[in-house]
Amino acid sequence: MSSFALRRLAVLGSTGSIGRSTLDVARFAGKRMQVVALSAHRNISLLAEQIREFHPKIVVVTYDSKNLRDFGELHQTAKEFKTKVLFGAESLTQIVTREDVDIVVSAIVGSAGLKSALDALTVGKTVALANKESLVVGGELVVDTAKKYGGKILPIDSEHSAVWQCLRAKTNQITENEQNAEFVQKIILTASGGPFRNFSSEQLKHVTIADALAHPTWQMGKKISIDSATLINKALEIIEARWFFGILPPKIAVVIHPQSVVHSMVEFADGSVMAQLSPPDMRLPIQWAIDYPQRFSCPSKKNNWAENFSLEFFPPDLERFPALRLGLEVAEQGGTAGAVLNAVNEVAVDAFLQEQLPFHKITTVCQTILNHHKHERRPTLEQLQAADHWAREETKTWLSR
C-alpha cells in the first residue's frame, strides 16, 4: 500500500446522508483515517451506534436538550467507550478547534454550519464543505477568514469537486483563484433537471409534494430534493462556485444533464473542455476532499465500460426555472444577498412541504423578498445573522398574507 498521512476527522452532521457517507469512506479507509469527533442533531440512536463503531473522543448533540428519547443509551454507550458528550450548537466550536483534528467535514444542513466553519478556519483547519449555506450566506467572509488564518476550504458537493478536479489538471494548487480568471473561459455546472425538467409552466402549478420528492437520479432528504426540483440548488451552487474558484458569474453556466454522470466541466481559454465523470455517489468527492492530493481505492460506484450508455446535455429553460437567473444575480451582488436568498428558500420550502405554498411560488417568494432587502456589501457575521433573521420573518409575513 502507498504511504499515507493519517487524516484525523471531525464529522459535523454524522447521522445525515453526507455524514453517513463520510463514515462509509472512513470505514473503508481503515487505518488511513481516524474519527476523532462527531456531531448530530436529534438522531441519538444512530449517534450511539456510530460511537460503538468508531470510538470518537467527543460528540456533540446540537439539539440542546438532555430529555431526548434514547439519551440513556447515548450516555451509557459514551461512558463505555470513554466518549465525552456535549450539548448545544455552541459546543461545535470545541470539536472543530481541537488540536487532534486535521479535517472538519461540515455536513450540517442549513445556515448553522457557517459559524462552525469560520471557527475551524480561524485556527487554520481544513474544512471539507458539504454545507452549501456556508459559502452561500457568508462567501466573502469565509474566503477572507481562510486566507487570513491559513485555513483551507475544500468542496464536497459533486459539482464543485468535479470543477476542482478539472482545474487541478491545470495546476497543482487547490484553486489559485487569481489565475483561474485568466485561463478559465467558463465553469459549466451540470444539473439532472430534477423530476420536472420536461414540465410546462402550467404543469408546474399543479405539482404535489410526492411529485417533487421523486428525484430521478439521487436519493436525498426532503429539503434538498425540493431544491433540486426548483433548481434552486443550482442557484446556490452558482453562488458557491463564485467563491470557491474566484470566477465571476458571467463565466458560470448550468446545463441539464439527466444521466448525472458528468458532474461538471471546465472550458479553458483555448476552447478545450475537461469533465469529471463517475456514477452518482457522494463517497467519491468526500474521499477526494479528505485524501487530497492522493488517490486511493474508494467504496463508491464505478463506471461500467462494458455497457452501452449515452450522455445528453440540454440548455435550461430560464422562464420555467427562474431560480438559475436568481442565482446569477445573487452571486453578482454578494454581501447579504446570499443570506437572504438562503433563508427565504428554507422557509418557503417548509411552507410547500406543509401545503401552505404552491410549488411554483417558491422562487417567486425568494425574488420578492430579495427585491426589498437592505443590502450590505461586506457584512460581518452578526450582520449576516441579522439578514437571515429578517428574511425569515419577512417570508412568514408574506406567507400569512
Image (tube, rainbow, N blue to C red):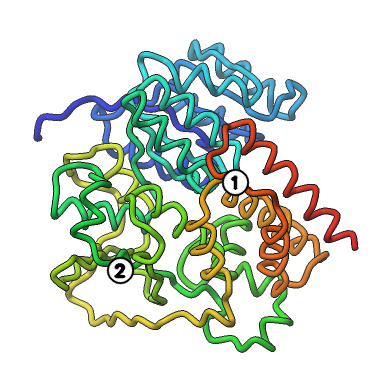
Looking at the rendered image, the quarter that the C terminus falls into is: bottom right
First reached walking from the N terminus: tag 2 or tag 1: 2
Q: Is residue 344 left or right of residue 284?
A: right
Q: Is residue 108 above or below residue 220?
A: above
* Mark 1 neighbour density, 10 Å: few (under 14) some (14–19) many (20 or more): many
The answer to whether residue 34 shows anywhere in this view is no
Looking at the rendered image, the quarter that the N terminus falls into is: top left
Mark nearest the camera among 2 and 1 is 1
User: Which residue does the numbered mark 2 point to in the structure image?
Assistant: 262
User: Which residue does the numbered mark 1 point to in the structure image?
Assistant: 336
Residue 59, image x, y percentages? 53, 22
* Residue found at x 43% / y 70%: 191
In terms of depth relative to the viewer, which is nearer, 13 or 166?
166
Q: Is residue 363 left or right of residue 174?
A: right
* Mark 2 neighbour density, 10 Å: few (under 14) some (14–19) many (20 or more): many
Q: Is residue 180 above or below residue 280?
A: above
Corner quadrant of residue 294: top left
